[in-house]
Image: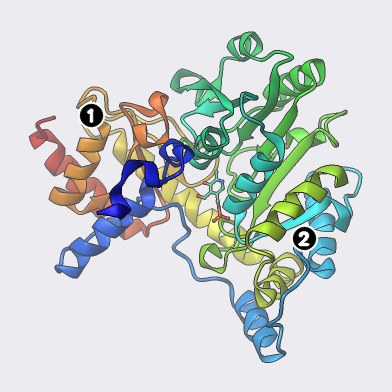
Amino acid sequence: MLATKADRFAEAVSRLGSESAFEVLARARALEAQGKRVVHMEIGEPDFDTPDHIKEAGIRAIRENHSHYTPSQGILELRDVVAAYASKFRHIEPWTAENVVLSPGAKPIIWNILSALLSPGDEFVYFDPAYPAYASCANYLGAKTVPIPLLEEKNWRMDLDELERRVSDRTKAIMINSPHNPTGGVLTKEDLERIAAMAQRHDFVVISDEIYSRNFYDREFNSIVSVPGMRDRTIVIDGFSKAYAMTGWRLGYAIMAPEYAKYVTLFNNNTFSCVASFVQQAGIAALTGDDEPVVRMNNIFRERRDALINGINKIDGMSCTMPEGAFYAFPNVTKITSDDKALAAYLLQESGVACLGGSAFGAAGKGYLRFSYAASLDDIHYALEQMALKIPQFKG
Ligand SMILES: Cc1ncc(COP(=O)(O)O)c(C=O)c1O
């Protein structure tokens, strides 16, 4: 069997991680195909339909034959719109189209940014637990990954003194993500200012994954790029998937100094060439059209968050901090088991609740579960009832 010979594959492939949400989604769909009711709280995508005006713009764009290649950086019109929207939203001196690079979803641009920045052995700091793509890509590239734990007792923020000890002149880049997947944690303005001071002192780049910038509940959104001195040192990642319920359209972007944009665009050019042209047209409609659907979806998320956290905290053995952003809850289940993945598998099989084991997001996620509350209130109440019923019988 030639295809399975170990040395047939690149050595670096063994360092790739994967996003377990897609595997659990496949298992959950298989159970549904057998007629079982499943509540989908595993995958991080809004359950809402894309707002009508965005859909119409996409359909119109296909009819008007926006069906050809575009520049690898993205069409000028959408890059202009992104630059205007993003600078206004973050209260900074306006970016221009030169600063913006488009991508089919935010995920590929994470890969292209890290590929443009990291050489083998370079130190890359990120926070654990984390969106799996960061460490997967950095490890693939042969960078030295430096995970800093996020702490439940700090509402899923880091110990800044610990961070201070772990960064140095060897640090090439740091990835922050606020609001945070998988915990829903949010960094404070003071956290961002201290991280910015470290970046300036040690001359490293900050990559700020702000894909949940519109899924924000109790406070004002703050971006590290707004801290004085950070404009040219920060690469901001954002996109349309979460705010506009456009996960399947595949549209994201990053904003950076033009010198970085040149290399990230080169990676676009070498990989996917460009984002589908009619999808870019739909992106213009999303950012220039009525914002009401975004606000409405967010208000619904907030209601679901409150119901879910309240319910989880009533289940014996589970406890959960209040997420301040994104649409995830990350309850502690260490009183039930240390094997979070086994508990997640049990909940799917026995109670039809699809969620993820926290250890899928890094070592510091061990003993937690991740629930996406992109599910209806009805489904959330059903899931809570099922868990309360089945968890006492779990033998982990
Ligand atoms: C933190 C984070 N960054 C980036 C992404 C990628 O989003 P997209 O669907 O735009 O590729 C996700 C998706 O789950 C995410 O959670």
Tell me the quadrant of the picture where the C terminus can be found: top left
Residue 260, percent from left and from top: 80, 43
Residue 84 picture quarter: bottom right
The secondary element bearing badge 2 is classed as: loop
Which quarter of the figure has residue 206? top right
Residue at left offset 63%, top offset 32%: 175
Q: Which residue is mark 2?
A: 73
Between 293 and 43, the one nearer to me in the picture: 43
Q: Look at 68% across and 80% down and name the residue there.
A: 57
Residue at the spot x=35%, y=50% of the render? 42
303 or 68: nearer the eye?
68
The spot of residue 284 in percent (x, y) is 74, 70
Ligand 1 within 8 Å of the CB at mark 2: no
Classed neighbour count for the residue bearing mark 2: other residues with Cα under 10 Å, few (<14), some (14–19), many (≥20): many
- For the image, the number of numbered tags is 2
Q: Is residue 180 depicted above or below 152 in this figure? A: below
Q: Nearer the viewer, residue 347 or 128?
A: 128
- Quadrant of image for the N terminus: bottom left
Q: Position of residue 228 (x, y in %)?
A: 87, 29
Determine whether label 1 and label 2 are within 8 Å by CB.
Answer: no
Graded by Cα atoms within 10 Å as few (under 14), some (14 to 19) or many (20 or more), the crowding at tag 1 reads some
For the residue pair 13 and 56, the one nearer the viewer reads as 13
- Drawn side of residue 66 relative to residue 129, left or right: right
Q: Amino acid at mark 2?
A: Gln
Circle nearer the N terminus (1, 2): 2
Q: Which residue is mark 1?
A: 339
Q: In the rendering, at what x and y percent does residue 316 appear?
A: 20, 30
Evaluate whether residue 25 shows in this view.
Answer: yes
CA gap between label 1 and label 2 equals: 44 Å
The amino acid marked with disc number 1 is Asp
Question: 214 left or right of 378?
Answer: right
Residue at 66 percent of width and 67 percent of height: 275
